[in-house]
Amino acid sequence: MQPDHIILATHNQGKLVELQSMMCAAGLGHITLKNAADYNLSAPEETADSFEGNALIKARFVAEQTGRAALADDSGLCVDALNGDPGVYSADWAGPAKDFDQAFHMIKERLEKNNVETDGATAHFVCVLAYIDEAGNTHIFKGTSDGALHFPPRGQNGFGYDPIFVPHGELRSFGEMSMEEKETYSARGRAFAAFASYLKTL
Ligand code: ITT
């Protein structure tokens, strides 16, 4: 049976908006989504060194605190020439003020230091969704999106690293796309498609 409620175990407004919109677009709007913030839950420390590990930490924390089904998202941008950095540290590179100009600068600076052409440097987004169902069972869904970095940042849409990422097959950055367009290419859109297919089997 499909759950009545799912708690979105994230404090990132950009992820929340995308996940809520994807649930409706997938015909799953009858499942009530709640936000972890509505339960006054703090964010647990993300101590794992993998996307999957951190997604599980966040989903388990919320499921245990609320006794409800919980969905967590751990994601990030992996730059090939930087050995996959910032990767699981994507949020940290923007610092406590969530200053993505700072993160863009760090990426550009490190590429230059490695004598790598910054414009067109290959990269991919990873998104892992961890779902803990009402019986406490764990389910993992993954998505990736390949593309290249472009500087200077372009576009006002989306969040985080979207203004510097151009997915393969496109000329525009995620920051220049509508949410629906981004979803067709994005790691979150792909992980969510697998999650939605799973929910529809219930
Ligand atoms: P929660 O842990 O509360 O979900 P967070 O922002 O800390 O929120 P993560 O630990 O998963 O999330 O860090 C992911 C980082 O990568 C974060 O800085 C995001 O802004 C960024 N990011 C994730 N998905 C993205 C996307 O689709 N487009 C642009 N940036 C993204």
Image (cartoon, rainbow, N blue to C red):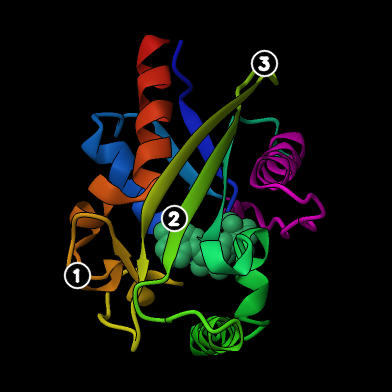
Q: Identify the main secondary structure in magenta.
A: helix
Where is residue 19? Give x, y as percent.
Answer: 39, 47
Q: Is residue 14 visible?
A: no
- Residue 16 is marked as 2
Distance, label 3 to label 1, CA atoms, is 43 Å
- In which quadrant of the rendered view does residue 71 lie? top right
Name the one closer to the observer, 107 or 13. 107
Mark 1 is surrounded, within 10 Å at the Cα level, by few (under 14), some (14 to 19) or many (20 or more) other residues, namely some
Going from N to C along the chain, the mark reached first, 3 or 1, is 3
Where is residue 50? Give x, y as percent.
Answer: 71, 47
Mark 2 belongs to which amino acid?
A: Leu
Q: Going 33% across and 89% down the picture, which residue do you hit?
A: 152
Where is residue 9? Give x, y as percent.
Answer: 60, 48
Quadrant in which the C terminus appears: top left
- In which quadrant of the rendered view does residue 62 lie? top right
Mark 3 belongs to which amino acid?
A: Ala
- In which quadrant of the rendered view does residue 179 lie? bottom left
User: The residue tagged with tag 1: helix, strand or loop?
Assistant: loop
Q: Going 54% across and 60% down the picture, which residue do you hit?
A: 78
Distance, label 2 to label 3, CA atoms, is 24 Å
Q: Is residue 153 visible?
A: yes
Q: Are marks 3 and 1 in contact (CB under 8 Å)?
A: no
Span of residues in magenta: 36-65
Q: Determine which residue is flagged by label 1.
A: 172
Q: Are marks 2 and 3 in contact (CB under 8 Å)?
A: no
Q: Determine which residue is flagged by label 3.
A: 135
Mark 1 belongs to which amino acid?
A: Arg
Residue 164 is inside the magenta segment: no
Residue 46 is inside the magenta segment: yes
Name the one closer to the observer, 130 or 9. 130
